[in-house]
């Protein structure tokens, strides 16, 4: 299929239904592109071609993405018979004994996975540079990162290898790579997508699953296919008022949109980032929305001070759990320096400290929810600066403050929505003079993904980005 990469996932599925192509042809087209582009991108780190070829020989059903090639991230999205290493040499190279609920839902939607995508070690960073796999690279400029932790997925989608790919987000890991690669990336409301059967939640609900894609409608259809309560889930998000695919096609009523002009510590934005936010605000205003300069009042020192113990203790739980299951003692030489120091920090957090941190973040969440009674949407940059260069951050740093301070500056907004549970979406509306995508983030009220998808669909129709292609394109 010569024009395979020009289509989004729903368009490819329609071509299959109409007999203009076949799942077999689409799988081979995607495999051809992986083989051609991955040596430069390092986006796909495990290939499951024969499993995919076997899958298309069995009935595929009539899902929204029937026959569409797909990739699973090397964190979560467990697939029976395929190892998940989380970008680290510490977990064993052992196949999963079963699918996760999410993987089952992806398959029921008709998506066919061709492999696993590159991630930073344990998904800690907004870049994708692990010792195990090496750095993934951005198809817009190979000297830059595709973001993280879903960097391999974003690089593959942006380069036209697959139209959408699995991603997850514990501090921005869907939205950051979407911003870095010029894609749509929605972090759903907490509890929207089940983490079962292996997990109830991760770190009290900081982590969410989703996809990165090239179109709003693909993101909406993927959410329709994957959301919802599964037996044993500890909690679930409120049901949507309409199908997400329908919301993405309908323009929202006039919205009151607040946009940030400084970060939450009062610092000015990088000029490219400021330009992206201003452009997004103008586009929204042209669509009839009310635009105001405003941001919630948040004590960022308090929020960061509460978030990091949760993040560190979550990593400690993960590593200690693997050690218990494998009988292998964690050693410093098994990890990158930043991972090791964060693990040690996480092990020092007491249960009382953990509970106190959540109390503080929940207080901030209530303050922000009250602020959203006056504003439907909050518009912010997704990143604090253009996509970072490869090796810009020192993944071997063992001093906690030195390791994390520049990273927090690079991602000044995204972790907030993981703490509050709110949905947030990256929309690719701006590229800088160097041709790099500069993402903008739209944050909605708890449970209101439908409103964000409606707004994003309106912006995509008004300011299409689909004709833009990176330097490395299929």
Image (cartoon, helix red, strand yellow):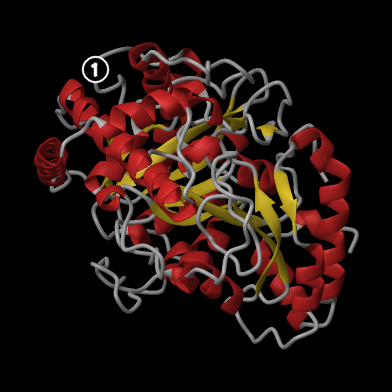
Location of the N terminus (image quadrant):
bottom right
**Residue 146 appears in view:** yes
Query: Nearest the camera: 77 or 338?
Result: 338
Count of numbered circles in the view: 1
* Residue 294 figure quarter: top left
Q: Please say if 104 is above or below 49.
A: below
Compared with residue 406, is residue 222 higher up or lower down, i.e. above or below? below
Which sits in the foreground, 408 or 92? 92
Q: Mark 1 Cα within 10 Å, few/some/many (few <14, many 20+)? A: few
Image spot of residue 134 (x, y percent): 68, 31
* Residue assigned mark 1: 265
Classify residue 388 by image quadrant: top right
Residue 231 x/y as whole percent: 32, 79
Q: Helix or strand or loop: what does disc 1 sit on?
A: loop
Query: Which residue: 16% across, 28% down?
Result: 298
Which residue is painted at 39% across and 11% down in the image?
402
Which of the two residues, 236 or 425, is positioned nearer the viewer here?
236
Instruction: Report the side of 74 relative to 298 (left or right).
Output: right
User: Is residue 164 found left or right of 27 in the rendered image?
Assistant: left
Q: Which residue is drawn at 25% across and 51% down?
A: 204
Name which residue lies at 49% across and 21% down: 337
Q: Position of residue 392 (x, y in %)?
A: 57, 15
Q: Can residue 294 be seen in this view?
A: no
Name the residue nearer the viewer: 334 or 151: 334
Please provide percent x and percent y for residue 188: 37, 56
């Amino acid at each position: 299929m010569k024009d395979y990469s020009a289509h989004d996932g729903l368009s490819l599925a329609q071509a299959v239904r109409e007999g203009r192509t076949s799942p077999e042809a689409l799988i081979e087209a995607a495999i051809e592109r992986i083989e051609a582009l991955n040596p430069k991108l390092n986006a796909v780190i495990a290939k499951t071609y024969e499993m995919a070829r076997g899958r298309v020989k069995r009935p595929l059903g009539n899902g929204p993405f029937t026959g569409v090639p797909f990739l699973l991230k090397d964190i979560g999205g467990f697939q029976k018979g395929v190892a998940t290493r989380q970008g680290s040499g510490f977990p064993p190279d052992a196949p999963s004994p079963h699918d996760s609920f999410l993987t089952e839902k992806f398959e029921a939607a008709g998506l066919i996975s061709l492999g696993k995508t590159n991630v930073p070690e344990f998904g800690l960073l907004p870049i994708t540079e692990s010792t195990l796999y090496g750095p993934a690279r951005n198809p817009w400029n190979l000297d830059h990162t595709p973001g993280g932790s879903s960097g391999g997925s974003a690089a593959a989608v942006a380069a036209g290898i697959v139209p959408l790919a699995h991603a997850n987000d514990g501090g921005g890991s869907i939205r950051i790579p979407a911003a870095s690669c010029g894609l749509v990336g929605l972090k759903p409301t907490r509890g929207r997508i089940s983490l079962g059967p292996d997990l109830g939640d991760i770190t009290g609900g900081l982590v969410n699953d989703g996809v990165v894609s090239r179109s709003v409608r693909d993101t909406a259809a993927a959410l329709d296919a994957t959301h919802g309560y599964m037996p044993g889930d500890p909690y679930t998000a409120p049901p949507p008022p309409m199908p997400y695919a329908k919301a993405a096609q309908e323009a929202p009523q006039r919205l009151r949109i607040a946009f940030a002009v400084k970060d939450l510590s009062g610092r000015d934005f990088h000029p490219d980032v400021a330009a992206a936010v201003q452009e997004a605000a103008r586009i929204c205003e042209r669509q009839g929305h009310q635009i105001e300069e405003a941001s919630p009042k948040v004590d960022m020192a308090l929020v960061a001070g509460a978030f990091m113990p949760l993040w560190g203790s979550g990593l400690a739980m993960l590593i200690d759990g693997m050690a218990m299951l494998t009988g292998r003692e964690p050693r410093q030489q098994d990890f990158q320096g930043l991972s090791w120091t964060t693990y040690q920090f996480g092990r020092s957090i007491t249960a009382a400290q953990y509970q106190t941190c959540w109390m503080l973040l929940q207080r901030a969440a209530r303050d922000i929810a009250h602020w959203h009674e006056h504003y439907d949407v909050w518009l912010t940059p997704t990143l604090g600066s253009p996509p970072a260069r490869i090796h810009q951050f020192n993944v071997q740093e063992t001093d906690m403050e030195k390791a994390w301070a520049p990273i927090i500056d690079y991602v000044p907004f995204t972790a907030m929505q993981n703490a509050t549970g709110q949905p947030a979406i990256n929309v690719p509306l701006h590229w800088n003079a160097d041709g790099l995508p500069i993402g903008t983030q739209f944050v909605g009220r708890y449970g209101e993904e439908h409103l964000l998808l409606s707004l994003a669909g309106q912006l995509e129709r008004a300011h299409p980005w689909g004709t833009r292609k990176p330097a490395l394109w299929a």
